[in-house]
Amino acid sequence: MKRMKRYQRLLAIVLCTVMAVAPITALAGSPLSSAAENQPPVAATLSGGDDQTPAADPADEEITLTEEPAEEPAEEPAEDPAEDETEPAEAPVPEEEPETAPAITDPNAVTVVMNGETLAFDAYARTIDGVTYVPLRGFFEAMGCTVGWDAGKKAITVTRADELNADFKVDSRLVNANGRSFYMDQPARTVADNAMIPLRAAAKIFTCEVAWDAVSRVATLTGGAVLESGETFYDADELLWLTRIVYHEAGNQKLDGKVAVANVVLNRKASTMFPNTVYDVIYDTHSGVQFITKSDKSIFRTPTAECELAAKLAIEGYVTAPNCLFFATKRAHQYCWASRHRQVYAIIGDHVFYL
């Protein structure tokens, strides 16, 4: 047994000595050369002592080289929504709603509808003394017109290109528009610093039909054509002779007296009892001389502008002597035929008018 141990020790010493002095290149043909390339040599460990097992021969060890796996890229942590640096889209800012006019509580307020469209005015339309008024500026600007104001004369002018030229005056019923003259139902007036005119007069400027709903208080206008000019609306010959006879008979009278004379002429023209033209009515002598004979040339005197205005107002429908067919001066009243056979309608100025 002791001999065997000595033999093992001797063999181990020999092997260690050989390995120590053998050049490293001697191992080039070893099966380890390819597997252990670039690996440090394995050092044999010799342990002394009778009770220890000698270290294993490196040649006897099975060495397995495995290829190291390529490093996988580290997974990026999922983004925390709370740490997202992207700013959230701003919520859309709601558009400001347009300011609405305060509700109108005036029981006299009127809604005006033009060809299906409700007209909006700064000052609302309303009824005054039973007549529907609209704000003059608001109405005509809604119709595309330009409105001018003369504070000294309290006069308003309305124009639209070359198709409309009209004027109004506060506290007056008279309207001059496109060479025509007519009266409104009530005068223009100022309400809360706004010039107002009767709706029907405004409608006439644009030849509108007017419908009124008393329950809903809605005035509906249908139309829109600009008022026909005086040059085409009036018969020039008729207007001339009517103006002349007004001047001849009532040139010194107030406007209503002048209009009354024009009314008598037009009433006769419309009656089957008299000729059917202004000229023939003026010179008619069938039932006496009411106006003038052809021998009297005073009718050719130049009439005043107010006489022409009276003639226009009468043609437009203004009446101060309705249905009257005769008239006489107050001085001749008791001597004339009409005073004995016709009913007196009224005394206007210096004339008495008969039905």
Image (cartoon, rainbow, N blue to C red):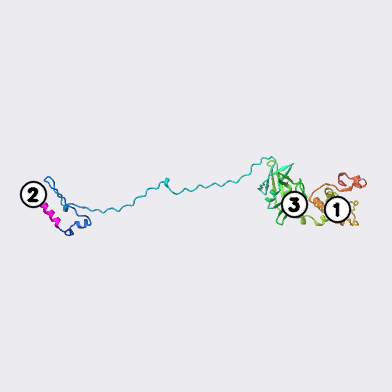
Q: CA distance from mark 1 to mark 3?
A: 25 Å
Which residue is farthest right?
A: 335
**Would residue 80 be counted in the magenta stretch?**
no
Q: Amino acid at mark 1?
A: Tyr
Which of discs 1 and 3 lies nearer the camera? The answer is 3
Span highlighted in magenta in the image: 7-21
**Disc 2 to disc 3: CB gap under 8 Å:** no
Which residue was labeled with disc 3? 167
Q: Residues within 10 Å of mark 2 (few under 14, many from 20)?
A: few
Sequence-wise, the earlier of marks 2 and 1 is 2
- The residue at 80%/57% (across/down) is 236
> Badge 2 is on which residue?
6
First in residue order: circle 1 vs circle 3: 3
Residue at 78% x, 52% y: name it.
181
Q: Amino acid at mark 2?
A: Arg
Residue 253 or residue 151, whichever sits in front: 151
